[in-house]
Amino acid sequence: MATVASSKSITVTVNGTTYEREVPARKLLIHFLRDDLDLTGSHIGCDTGNCGACSVIVDGTLVKSCMMLAVQADGATIETVEGLAEDGELNELQRSFNEHHALQCGYCTPGMLMSATALLRANPSPSEQEIRKALQGNICRCTGYWNIIEAVKAVAK
Amino acid sequence: MSVETASEARASAVAPERVEAPLKGWAGQSVPRKEDKRLVQGEGLFVDDIKRHGMGYLHFVRSPYAHAHITRIDVSAAEAIPGVYGTLTGEEVAALTDPFFQISSPPGAHVKDYALAVGKVRYVGEPVVAVVAETRELARDASELVEVEYEPLPPVVDARRALDEDAPVLHEEAGSNLMWTGVYEWGDVEQAFAEADRIVTIKELHFHRFNSTPLECDAALVEYNRGVGQWTIYTNNQFPGFAAIMMGPALRVGLDKLRFVTQDIGGGFGNKITSHPQLVVCCLLARKLNRPIQWTEWRTDFHMSMSHGNERWFHDTEVAVKEDGTLLGFRTKALDDAGAWLRYEPLGGVIWAQVTPGMYRWRNIRLEFTQVATNKAPVSPNRGYSRMQHLWFTERVIDIVAHELGLDPVEVRKRNYIRAEEMPYETPNGCVYDSGDYARMLDLALELVGYDRIEERRAEAASRGKLLGVGIGSTLDSGTNNFGQSRLINPELQFSGNNEVATVKLDIFGEIVVTLGTTPQGQGHETTAAQVVADILGCSVDDVHVRAGHDSYWNSHAGFSGTYASQFAVTGLSAVKGATEMLAAEIKKLGSVILGAPEEALELADGTVRVKDNPEAALPFMACGAIINANNAGLPEDLDVTLNCRYVYRPPFQPPDVERKYGNLTLTYAAQVHVAVIEVDPETGYYEIVDYAAVDDCGVRINPQIVEGQVMGATAQAIGAAMHEAFEYDEEGNLLTPNFYDYHVPHALDMPPLATGAIESPSPFTPLGTKGMGEGGGAGIHAICAAVQDALRGHGDAIVWDSHNPYRRVWEMLQHPERTRELVEVKAA
């Protein structure tokens, strides 16, 4: 067991704000976001990297933030669910989730939104199968995914 | 004496009094949810989001053995680490608390259940010691320094062996592993078998162990106010009323010392009802260490220790059938596996009886129910709790009978379904099915999968080497419990009826504020409550602010408050309706004084109270709120108006007849008919669902989109349970599926095409015509089981005997159909 964890100073830009923090080397990025920066929108639903509730975008790449150490994010630009709304207004994808009843408890929703955001950036006109594939790393226990798929489809160009 | 017929039964039904017709307006519309705005921005407030200065993180040291004596615990090395705040052991728990109240009559009543293991562990993952430290990581590390010495004992893992003479005994105080047993018999079973043309016997059926695995695990943040001796428990427990009555006596305090607060809950499905042991540990540590305690369960901990669904065996089933497929009755022995502790059990031993005959007219039923303890995680309610197991059994019986007698499963269902014109229908055990048209639902579901072309499709699939199968699952989602049914388990219990509370007030600036006693986990209570309020007050849903979550400081709760067992649309919304009607009457009373018109001449519209014939003469709600709350001098002395109204809805129930095990056990009976079409690859047993229809009838739908969402979610969970999800143990009692690596829940790619349909048979017994709903997913398990059996028809004719049919089991059934054929027999009576 490690009684004294080594730590490191890191600088990250999250949703446009730059933070400099001292973090233990062992700390997961998701715990850094939630506990140190109080960005609690990203959630934790498993301890094995399966559920995707913690999905964020790091330097343009979709990442499960429980599978990355905070120190690995040093210098990175990170986008989380808190950064999706534009000037306090829900963006098109968020509105579509609301209109299509694509969420119930809302716990998986931040991760779903980030996965869908990454998909739509890479592929603005995904097929239904491409949407399903892009969301396969995100578990939802409430909706059965049908309405989530519809919500993403409605935003696809 | 002849066998009682369904129509005779109807004549003797004692139905609750009918109530008024439902509302119109906002209700009935798919209003987009009010909750979503915060949730899609990551601004929901889930327990783990809450932080407090100086809080300590709690981690549990858990048992690595399924069954063992604890011979020594040493926490000194863990406590010596800087940053470790303290620990709690079973010995301390036994000194500081009393064992949890047991629902069971003897022998289960003798079980001594504490918040941590005392002297002995009884399943892998059982909490033994709690460690609190400055960080999550440190708490986890320090836990590894806690030394626990065990003396392993042989475990009992298979419920069928639990009552063997040489079986290891979990709870010595109870004498054996028998926790509860009871015989239920209604009608004239002997006579039914005497009148039968055929008797179909089924040696063994097995409903497997799984649960709904809400994505957010259990969690709490607990603060202790030393001065007043009160704990504030921020939690995601979904039934605070139950937690309170378990925790208060254990902690030796009155319920006012336990303040429960919830806001957003990341899924519950019944699995978050029984976290009271962990909450007691948090309470003890908050008091002992004088600091807030934060506990968030890890996924693997959840899988190993929390709320598995009831695993159930059905043995020696006999079904009395007429030549034409008319079902006269059945007898069976249900063996329920409670796991190591009775945390909500043995209520599963009676909850099934809410739906004793399923959707069918059979009148003569005998069921011997036995519940045993095993060295596995304790069971607790899981979506469809106990009814799902029983309805799976009745649906299996229907399909096995049809299969063995060469009858059409559609015809057998239609012949035996309770008919629309027989509603309200009294079942053999006194439950009153309120309304419904099951045959019409079946027709609709069949139409949605294109059933008229099914034989063509079967041939087409065969041409591709695939076996096509169609299966039906028809189930009831009984809702709004009569807690009096607990007396059938233990006549000493003093519970009956049900209740829920809402308050609605008009505040100084005209704010309409609603508080609920419920603890929603995604069911959209803020939205549907606002729809009901807006219709009564004549305003917009946007004008109605429904507070998120539950807080026992709000005084808007009662003994049964919470969100569980398919009841909000009845209990919650009826409370909202009652409180809002009280408020509306008060607004009119005040309006009458201010506007100088009689109350009868007034109406509520556009956020005002106004004179019907002269809408110019209007008093805005804002003025009403201001007058009563802040500008009330000069009002008539006898004006009894506070604009702050509290209503307790109490459903019309009588305590059941304990001797006869007879009475109405729930107020409403929503119905589901699901149809699955699958294609099986006979080489591998791999199969996929190629078409799926889910038809639901939950009476009046306040928000059809939310209702459909519940149907979809329940369907997805059923598909997962039927095909993929199982809590499987090895012989030593190790859980083989302790996290999402091994426990596969459906992903977006797993979901079949889905068609949903709905009919509305308003409940005549509820104030809004609504029925509780949301748990109807069991229908999917039955439909898939039936579809597998249908696909294998003519290919060995295997009988589907287990609720869990992963590809390997289908392959086994194809390879060795005789192993399942041995389970059934048809006898001429």
Image (spheres, coloured by chain):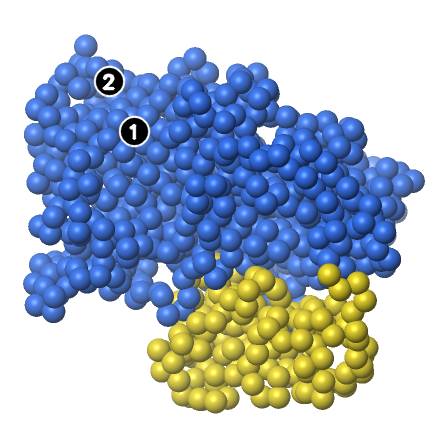
Chain colours: A yellow, B blue
Q: Residues within 10 Å of mark 2 (few under 14, many from 20)?
A: many
Work out which quarter of the rendered image holds the C terminus of chain B and state it: top left
Question: In the image, is B229 to the left or to the right of B178?
Answer: right
Which residue is labeled 1 in the image? B315
Determine whether B27 is above or below B699 in the image: below
Q: Chain of mark 2?
A: B
Residue B527 figure quarter? bottom right
Give whichever of B307, B730 is nearer the camera.
B730
- Residue type, numbered disc 1: His
Give whichever of B42, A36 is nearer the camera.
A36
* Image disc number at residue B189: 2
What residue appears at the point 86 percent right and 57 percent down from the top-left corner? B82
Q: Is residue B286 visible?
A: no
Q: Earlier in the sequence, mark 2 or mark 1?
A: 2
Instruction: Say what secondary structure mark 2 lies in.
Output: helix
What residue appears at the point 41 percent right and 23 percent down from the top-left corner? B164
- Image location of residue B597, percent across then percent down: 68, 47
Do the residues marked 2 and 1 share a common chain?
yes
Residue sitting at the far top: B1
Residue B770 figure quarter? top left
- Image location of residue B383, percent across then percent down: 46, 46
Question: In the image, is B592 to the left or to the right of B273?
Answer: right
Give whichever of B406, B478 is nearer the camera.
B406
- Image location of residue B331, percent across then percent down: 27, 24
Do the numbered discs 2 and 1 sit on residues whose CB atoms are within 8 Å? Answer: no
